[in-house]
Amino acid sequence: VAMTLQSKTLGILVLTLGISILILYFALHIIVLGSFSDQENDDAHQNIQRVRSAIDDDLTTLEGTARDWSLWDDTYSYIADKNDLYVQSNLSDTNSMVSNRLNLMLFADTQGHVVFAKSMDYRSDKVEGTPASILSQVYLNRPMLRHSTATSSIQGIILLPSRALLIASELIMHSSGDGAIDGTARLGRS
């Protein structure tokens, strides 16, 4: 009888201990995994915000560069008279594009005809032919790049077959910002 009472007590004690361990395991599992899951979600959200902020900063910089090129009397004159001296003075080498981290420079007149287009990999300082996929995406009649007013500024991301391209589009006007619009300057960075 003593053996049976001892084994029953030991059995109840082992069963109680086993149930307690299982309850603690599941409680800690839920608490710890929940905390890790929350932490991972917070980290992912912060990383998304960092990427978004970096892209916004890049687009703002690109927009400023596009505005510098578009609100310049020399660019305005070049679009009007197609004078090759402008290209020789400002665009014949790759310095302008490399220093501004540009993969694309495209100037179009008000009818949408491309007056100047240059594509390159600014990281390797290698000029490339301007692919048709880029021209079709940044052409003047694209809805995303259609200026609604004379003071509008457009920036965004265009998905190309091989990469994403940050794009800024500004209207070409006199340096003062007055007068008729002479075309559009589109600058891109990938």
Image (spheres, grey):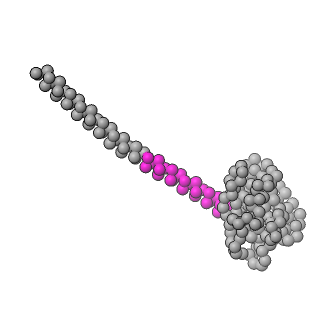
Is 190 located above or below residue 114 in the figure? above
Q: How many numbered marks are there?
A: 0
Is 45 located above or below residue 60 in the figure? above
Placement of the N terminus among the 4 image quadrants: top left
- Identify the residue at the far bottom of this view: 179
Is residue 86 toward the left or the right of residue 46 in the image? right
Is residue 153 toward the left or the right of residue 46 in the image? right
Q: Where is residue 65 shown, x and y percent of the image?
A: 71, 63
Q: Residue at x 72, y 51 (%)?
A: 161
Q: Residue at x 77, y 63 (%)?
A: 139
Is residue 57 toward the left or the right of residue 22 in the image? right
Q: Residue at x 68, y 55 (%)?
A: 159
Q: Which residues are magenta?
A: 37-64
Is 190 located above or below residue 61 in the figure? above
Residue 99 in view: no
Residue 129 in view: yes
Residue nearer the viewer, 71 or 12:
12
Q: Where is residue 189 shown, x and y percent of the image?
A: 70, 56
Q: Quadrant of residue 27?
A: top left
Q: Quadrant of residue 13?
A: top left
Q: Where is residue 116 shown, x and y percent of the image?
A: 83, 62
Q: Residue at x 80, y 67 (%)?
A: 112
- Identify the residue at the far left of this view: 1
Q: Quadrant of residue 171?
A: bottom right
Q: Is residue 173 magenta?
A: no
Q: Where is residue 67 shown, x and y percent of the image?
A: 72, 67
Q: Is residue 52 magenta?
A: yes
Is residue 13 toward the left or the right of residue 161 in the image? left
Magenta segment, principal secondary structure?
Answer: helix
